[in-house]
Image: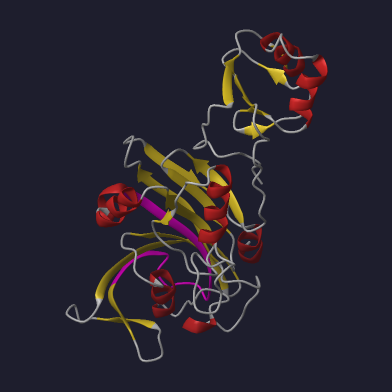
Amino acid sequence: MRKGYSKSYRADNIKRFPVSEGTTLLPFLFSIMPDMSRTEVKNLLKYEHVALKGEVVTQFDTPLLPDDVVEINFGRPFYKFNDPHVNILYEDEWLVVIEKASGLLSVANDNSRDNNAFRIVRDYVRNCNPESRLYICHRLDQYTSGILVFSKDEDLMRELRSNWDFYIKERKYMCVTENVPAIPEDTIRSYLIENSRMQMCSTNDSEQGQLAVTHYRVIQSRDRYALIDVEIFTGKKNQIRVHMSDLGCPIAGDRKYGAETNPGRRLMLHNYRFTFIHPVTSELMRFSLSTPQIFRKLTQ
């Protein structure tokens, strides 16, 4: 778990000190703060006022290299983020990108108001800067793990949502299915509608449903289970779950769409890659996660 601090918080009491030559941390701190006592300098280090490369550091002999930048918060300790369900992958003054665990809601619902990714990340950015705001740019199903993007600016969130197909370049998932698809690689196209049981289902009626396009490729299989690499070209509700079920290969653990077993004790669907154009800097941002070990173990 990354123990970082919010780069959006840049109050006057945070100072940046570039490193010009190789050394270790404590001698460097003594050299840049000659007017402070050695005890005061050591206390800044001990009580987590010093950071290097976005990480809070307390070890006096931490190596420093030329072009490193040491940051010191003279007002208060840097805030450490540590949550078992959320891992911060990236943060700047506009966006926060996280890895969400299976079982965690993206946002609150009627049954759970507090335990969700939005609240966890919102509390994090507010702790670093009480004036910060947070907006969710898209969602993952509660039991799907993977990558979520939040915006710190409402207009930026609206820009992303309104021009989603322009900014979003790649969304890829790994899943484990019950049964092995008869065709090892294919593209599924159907129109999705919600039925009376609050489930999404496929239809050929383009007037009633919304187009969903999913490409899949079988990676490996063992017995009745298959590991499948999936890319979606539309982002419709439960899209992958419906399309795998349509193949007669529901995602393991997905009883809502026909699965009979739950070998991983979770919905075995994981968003492992998310690539998008940064709406402010225009940089291509690519985030990748490893496949959960249980996915490969079950299908090898």
Name, please, the residue furthest toward the bottom. Answer: 196
**Image quadrant assignment for residue 230:** bottom left
Q: Is residue 63 above or below residue 300?
A: above
Q: State which quarter of the image contains the C terminus.
A: bottom right
**Image quadrant assignment for residue 57:** top right
Residue under the point 45% across and 72% down: 181
Q: Give how far across and how far down residue 273 sits, in percent.
A: 46, 51
Q: In this rendering, would 70 be left or right of 175?
A: right
Q: Is residue 248 in view?
A: yes
Residue stretch rendered in magenta on the structure? 168-189
Q: Give how far across and how far down residue 288 sits, in percent.
A: 50, 46
Q: Give how far across and how far down residue 171 sits, in percent.
A: 40, 55
Q: Looking at the image, which is closer to me, 65 or 151?
A: 151
Q: Looking at the image, which is closer to me, 38 or 289?
A: 38
Name, please, the residue furthest toward the left. Answer: 207
Q: Give how far across and how far down residue 164 sits, in percent.
A: 29, 54
Q: Main secondary structure of the magenta part?
A: strand
